[in-house]
Image (cartoon, grey):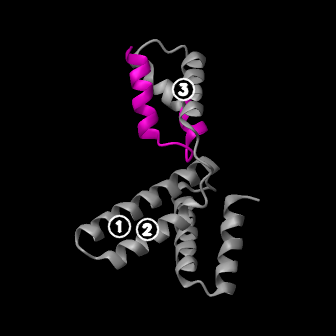
Amino acid sequence: MTLKDRINDDTKAAMRAKDKARLGTLRMLSSALKDAEIKQGEELAEPDQLALINKLIKQRRDSAEQYRDAGREEQAAAEEAEAEVLAEYLPPALSQEEVDAAIDEAISESGASGPQDMGSVMGRLKGKLQGRADLGAVSQRVKERLGS
Protein backbone atom coordinates (compact mmCIF):
# COMPACT_ATOMS: atom_id res chain seq x y z
CA MET A 1 0.00 0.00 0.00
CA THR A 2 1.44 3.35 -1.01
CA LEU A 3 1.54 6.32 1.29
CA LYS A 4 -1.17 8.09 -0.73
CA ASP A 5 -3.43 5.03 -0.51
CA ARG A 6 -2.93 4.91 3.24
CA ILE A 7 -3.78 8.60 3.57
CA ASN A 8 -6.93 8.12 1.44
CA ASP A 9 -8.04 5.12 3.54
CA ASP A 10 -7.42 7.04 6.76
CA THR A 11 -9.37 10.01 5.38
CA LYS A 12 -12.36 7.76 4.73
CA ALA A 13 -12.07 6.27 8.21
CA ALA A 14 -11.96 9.77 9.76
CA MET A 15 -15.11 10.69 7.80
CA ARG A 16 -16.91 7.61 9.10
CA ALA A 17 -15.76 8.32 12.65
CA LYS A 18 -16.77 11.99 12.30
CA ASP A 19 -13.32 13.01 13.56
CA LYS A 20 -13.27 16.55 12.16
CA ALA A 21 -9.81 17.49 13.42
CA ARG A 22 -8.12 14.42 11.94
CA LEU A 23 -10.16 14.71 8.73
CA GLY A 24 -9.08 18.32 8.25
CA THR A 25 -5.43 17.44 8.75
CA LEU A 26 -5.60 14.52 6.31
CA ARG A 27 -7.35 16.63 3.69
CA MET A 28 -4.68 19.31 4.08
CA LEU A 29 -1.98 16.65 3.65
CA SER A 30 -3.65 15.23 0.52
CA SER A 31 -3.95 18.71 -0.90
CA ALA A 32 -0.30 19.53 -0.18
CA LEU A 33 0.83 16.30 -1.86
CA LYS A 34 -1.34 16.99 -4.90
CA ASP A 35 -0.05 20.59 -5.16
CA ALA A 36 3.55 19.35 -5.03
CA GLU A 37 2.82 16.80 -7.75
CA ILE A 38 1.28 19.48 -9.96
CA LYS A 39 4.33 21.73 -9.47
CA GLN A 40 6.69 18.87 -10.24
CA GLY A 41 4.61 17.66 -13.17
CA GLU A 42 4.68 14.02 -12.06
CA GLU A 43 3.93 11.83 -9.08
CA LEU A 44 6.22 12.42 -6.12
CA ALA A 45 8.66 9.70 -5.13
CA GLU A 46 8.32 8.45 -1.57
CA PRO A 47 11.41 10.33 -0.28
CA ASP A 48 9.89 13.55 -1.66
CA GLN A 49 6.55 12.76 0.00
CA LEU A 50 8.34 12.19 3.31
CA ALA A 51 10.26 15.45 2.90
CA LEU A 52 6.96 17.28 2.36
CA ILE A 53 5.43 15.68 5.45
CA ASN A 54 8.50 16.68 7.48
CA LYS A 55 8.14 20.24 6.21
CA LEU A 56 4.46 20.33 7.21
CA ILE A 57 5.28 18.98 10.68
CA LYS A 58 7.98 21.62 11.14
CA GLN A 59 5.51 24.34 10.09
CA ARG A 60 2.96 23.09 12.63
CA ARG A 61 5.51 22.98 15.45
CA ASP A 62 6.79 26.46 14.60
CA SER A 63 3.21 27.77 14.58
CA ALA A 64 2.50 26.11 17.93
CA GLU A 65 5.55 27.79 19.42
CA GLN A 66 4.44 31.18 18.13
CA TYR A 67 0.93 30.64 19.50
CA ARG A 68 2.37 29.72 22.90
CA ASP A 69 4.54 32.84 22.89
CA ALA A 70 1.38 34.87 22.22
CA GLY A 71 -0.49 33.11 25.05
CA ARG A 72 -2.89 31.29 22.71
CA GLU A 73 -2.63 27.82 24.19
CA GLU A 74 -5.75 26.45 22.47
CA GLN A 75 -4.41 27.19 18.97
CA ALA A 76 -0.98 25.84 19.96
CA ALA A 77 -2.58 22.56 21.06
CA ALA A 78 -4.46 22.32 17.74
CA GLU A 79 -1.21 22.80 15.78
CA GLU A 80 0.54 20.16 17.91
CA ALA A 81 -2.34 17.74 17.31
CA GLU A 82 -1.99 18.26 13.55
CA ALA A 83 1.75 17.61 13.80
CA GLU A 84 1.06 14.35 15.64
CA VAL A 85 -1.37 13.18 12.94
CA LEU A 86 1.19 14.00 10.24
CA ALA A 87 3.97 12.21 12.14
CA GLU A 88 2.00 8.95 11.86
CA TYR A 89 2.93 8.86 8.17
CA LEU A 90 6.67 9.00 8.73
CA PRO A 91 8.67 5.79 9.02
CA PRO A 92 10.13 5.00 12.46
CA ALA A 93 13.10 7.19 13.33
CA LEU A 94 16.55 5.64 13.13
CA SER A 95 18.66 5.23 16.24
CA GLN A 96 21.88 7.23 16.58
CA GLU A 97 23.88 4.03 15.95
CA GLU A 98 21.99 3.38 12.69
CA VAL A 99 22.58 6.96 11.55
CA ASP A 100 26.30 6.68 12.38
CA ALA A 101 26.52 3.40 10.44
CA ALA A 102 24.83 5.02 7.41
CA ILE A 103 27.26 7.97 7.62
CA ASP A 104 30.26 5.61 7.78
CA GLU A 105 28.93 3.65 4.81
CA ALA A 106 28.34 6.80 2.73
CA ILE A 107 31.81 8.14 3.52
CA SER A 108 33.49 4.88 2.52
CA GLU A 109 31.33 4.50 -0.66
CA SER A 110 32.11 8.01 -1.83
CA GLY A 111 35.77 7.90 -0.85
CA ALA A 112 35.35 11.20 0.99
CA SER A 113 38.50 12.53 2.59
CA GLY A 114 37.68 16.05 3.69
CA PRO A 115 35.09 18.79 4.01
CA GLN A 116 35.12 19.38 0.25
CA ASP A 117 33.45 15.96 -0.20
CA MET A 118 30.50 16.76 2.06
CA GLY A 119 28.07 17.26 -0.84
CA SER A 120 28.64 13.79 -2.25
CA VAL A 121 28.25 12.18 1.19
CA MET A 122 25.04 14.10 1.96
CA GLY A 123 23.69 13.25 -1.50
CA ARG A 124 24.05 9.56 -0.70
CA LEU A 125 22.52 9.96 2.76
CA LYS A 126 19.54 12.10 1.81
CA GLY A 127 17.66 9.33 0.01
CA LYS A 128 18.38 6.77 2.74
CA LEU A 129 17.63 8.94 5.75
CA GLN A 130 14.88 11.29 4.49
CA GLY A 131 12.01 11.19 6.96
CA ARG A 132 13.86 8.86 9.30
CA ALA A 133 16.45 11.24 10.75
CA ASP A 134 16.97 14.98 11.15
CA LEU A 135 19.10 15.81 8.12
CA GLY A 136 20.40 18.97 9.79
CA ALA A 137 21.85 16.90 12.63
CA VAL A 138 23.16 14.33 10.14
CA SER A 139 24.87 17.11 8.19
CA GLN A 140 26.53 18.33 11.38
CA ARG A 141 27.80 14.81 12.18
CA VAL A 142 29.14 14.38 8.63
CA LYS A 143 30.90 17.74 8.92
CA GLU A 144 32.52 16.63 12.19
CA ARG A 145 33.66 13.32 10.68
CA LEU A 146 35.07 14.88 7.54
CA GLY A 147 36.73 17.77 9.37
CA SER A 148 38.77 15.45 11.59
Image quadrant occupied by the N terminus = bottom right
Residue type marked 1: Ala
Nearer-N-terminus badge (3/1): 1
What residue appears at the point 48 percent right and 71 percent down from the top-left corner? 81
Disc 3 designates what residue?
103
What residue appears at the point 58 percent right and 69 percent down from the top-left corner? 30
Where disc 2 sits, the SS reads: helix
> What secondary structure predominates along the stretch shown in magenta?
helix
Which contiguous range is marked in magenta? Answer: 124-148
**Which label lies toward us, 2 or 3?**
2
Other residues around mark 3 within 10 Å, as few (<14) / some (14–19) / many (≥20): many
Image quadrant occupied by the C terminus = top left
106 vs 134, nearest the viewer: 134
Which residue, as the protein is rendered here, is positioned at the far left? 70
Where disc 3 sits, the SS reads: helix
Which residue, as the protein is rendered here, is positioned at the far right? 1
Disc 2 designates what residue?
80
Determine whether 65 is above or below 10 in the image. Answer: above
Contact? badges 1 and 2 (CB < 8 Å): yes
Contact? badges 3 and 1 (CB < 8 Å): no
What is the spatial separation of the Cα atoms under label 3 and label 1, in whole angstroms?
32 Å
What number is the disc on residue 64?
1
